[in-house]
Structures are given as structure tokens and as C-alpha cells.
Amino acid sequence: MVGGELRRAVRWVLVGAALLSVAGGCRGARRPAPVSGPPPVSLSLPEAAPAPAVEKEDSVPEREAESGPSRELLAEVEWLRSTWPTETQEVRFEPLVPALLRWVPRGQEVRAHVYSHNHDCAPVILTRGEDEWESYVAENPDSRDDEPWPPELTGRVLESEQVQGGVPHRSYTSVHFGATFHEETGGGTEAQQPDGSWKEVSGYGAGDGGVPHGALVSVDEEVARFGGVSVVFEGKCDGPWEWLPCSTGGERPCNACRRIGILEYHPNVMGGGYPRMTPRYSHRRPTCSERCPGRSHPDMKRVRDLMAQVQFWRDGDEPVAERPSLYRSDIRCRREHPVPGP
């Protein structure tokens, strides 16, 4: 889901300028531990174990999500498409995140492999975002009333291992898989416990927004593919323009907001710049600069409410060998992303 974060940079779809605004942002605050100690020594990591069978969970919100979008939601999507057919052309809408969440049962960890331009089929430990949120709230009770993190799988990409004082330690970097694949500029170090489990002993986070790797475009039992471009629309007053007198004399053009257009921005695209809207009125020159009265349109809220419930995206054009993806099997990952020869 988009999560309603419409305060980010936007662009007119007719202008076509994509802006930077990383969905979800860097969530280094999840692991507020101090910076880790000495740099680890790289060692070979064990092969991934087969993923456990996923049992159906007795979660009311997830059962509702798996039943598919409601008729009311589908009707709103159709309204958006029919009202702005040009702007929404080739924009896709499918609820894919629930299928991805089924990879990992609540309260468990699953080992998988991730490919991107920063990851060469690297092993990643996946957990459910709900579990991470509950742990975070337990450690930070003041956050209990905050908006929960969006539905996702959180991951620890295993980088290297070392032995300190006879105890195995491993370092990791943090990633998130949901409506988008996002890599934090953060991570930490874990120490193995006597029972074989791992406990975090240090962590770090740069808070610089991290690296986006694209929107989720497909998912099945074995692979989830990303690389699409997330799309968020926002309603904007689109005229007509009318000339209103100023209290001190003169006149200026003001947007009557009797119709709206939609703006598009891309939360997981690097790039930016704030485009300026060009008012569409005659070459008549304003003779005063008094602020125009505030205007709105009921469909602006309608668009905003829809964006809080759905994830739109445009598919990317990368071949499979270049598309960021999450795999259950290391063999499948390396078959689709072979290491280039000398």
C-alpha cells in the first residue's frame, strides 16, 4: 500500500518529471543500537535451507486482504481510470503484497536469496513486518499509538561472519520487501547464542533515505520480481482561472477549482526537481498580488483516500537478468543471474 504519504514531491503527468521520495524512508530507528565494532572478516555462508511450508494464518486483516479488493475499491479504481484515461494509461493495479507475505509465517524466519545491482543472490533472513513492529513498540512504548509500518517482509542480508572470543558473529544490512523493495543505509551485527539463535549486539543507520530498487510487479511460490515504478496520484485544482479584484485595487487571476487534474509522483525513483504549474489564462497581466482565496474540490479527497488504499505501478523494461528479485532458491537465483565470465 501507498500509506497515504502524499506530502512528497510531485510532478504534473503532462510534464513528466519524476521526483525522489523513497517510500517508507530509511527506518534505521527500528534498531537504535550503537555503531558496530571492528569490521568483520568475510567467510563462506551456508547454503539456504528449503523454505518451510506456509500455513494459513488466522489473521482477520490478512484474511480480508487475501479475499481481494472490495467492490467499492474496484469501483473507485475504475472511476480514476475513466476520469483520467490518458494519465492512468499503462498504470497497473494488483494486490500482490498478501501473496508475498505468505512466504513467511508470523513469528518465524525464512531464508531466501536477493538479487539487485547491490546483491548477487545474497542470502537474506526474512521476517514479517508485523513482528518487527510489535518488537519495536515493546521496546518503545511511546510509539504504540503511531501509524504501524506498512505490510512487508523485513530482511537482513547476510554480509560476512567472524568469530569474537569464541562466539560466532555475523554482519548484515537491512532491506524491506513489500509494495516496493527498499534497501536501508543501515544494518548491524548479531551474535550466536548457546541455543543456536542469533541476537543483535550492535546496529547503525545513516538516515539518508537508502536505496530504492523498484515496485513489486509479480510474485509466485518461488520468486518475487520488483523493478517497476511506483505511481501515486494526487488531485490538483485545474481551473478555470478567473480574474478577481484586490482589496487595494487591480486584479489577479485565481484558480476557481471547479475541475481537478491529477499529479503523479514516483516514490521509488531516484531523480528530482520541483516542476512549476503554468496557469492557463490569457496574456492579460495581473495588476496586484493579493493572495487568492483558498479553493478545493471534493474529488481531491476522493483521490487521496484511494491512494491510501492501493498500490499503482508502471512495469519496468529490464530483462529478467537485470531485474531486482527475491528468490526462495539460490539455484534459481543464480540460474537467472549468472556471474559473467572473464
Image: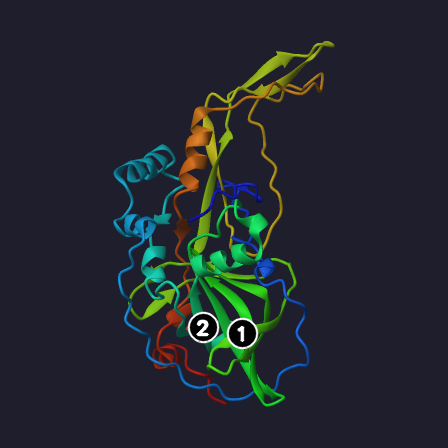
Kindly indicate whether the residue at mark 1 contacts the one at mark 2 (C-beta within 8 angstroms): no
On the image, the x and y values in percent for residue 264 come to 49, 42
Q: Which residue is mark 1?
A: 199
Question: On the rendered structure, is 267 left or right of 312?
Answer: right
- Up/down of 17 relative to 85, above or below: below
Q: Please say whether residue 323 is visible from this viewpoint.
A: no
In this rendering, the answer to whether 239 lies above or below 54 is above
Q: Residues within 10 Å of mark 2 (few under 14, many from 20)?
A: many
Going 34% across and 65% down the picture, which residue do you hit? Answer: 105
The earlier-in-sequence mark between 2 and 1 is 2
Per the image, label 1 sits on a secondary structure element best described as strand
Q: In this orientation, which residue lies closer to the viewer: 120 or 198?
A: 198
In the displayed structure, 67 sits above or below 166; it is above
Which residue is located at x 50 percent, y 90 percent?
A: 342
Cα distance, mark 2 to mark 1? 13 Å
Measuring from the top left, give residue 76's x and y in whole percent: 33, 36
Query: Element at badge 2?
Result: strand
Residue at 57%, 57% in the rendered image:
270
The image's colour scheme reads rainbow
Residue sitting at x 55%, y 71%: 173
Where is residue 316? Give x, y as percent: 42, 59
Where in the figure is residue 158, as x and y percent of width and height? 51, 77
Along the line of sight, the residue nearer the viewer: 68 or 136: 136
The residue under label 2 is: 125
> 90 or 131, which lies in front?
131
What amino acid is found at the position of numbered circle 1 in the picture? Lys
Q: In the drawing, what numbered circle is on residue 137?
A: none
Label 1 crowd (10 A; few <14 / some 14-19 / many >=20)? few
The amino acid on which the numbered mark 2 sits, given as a three-letter code, is: Ile
The front one of 300 and 274 is 300
**Above or below: residue 231 compared with residue 284:** below
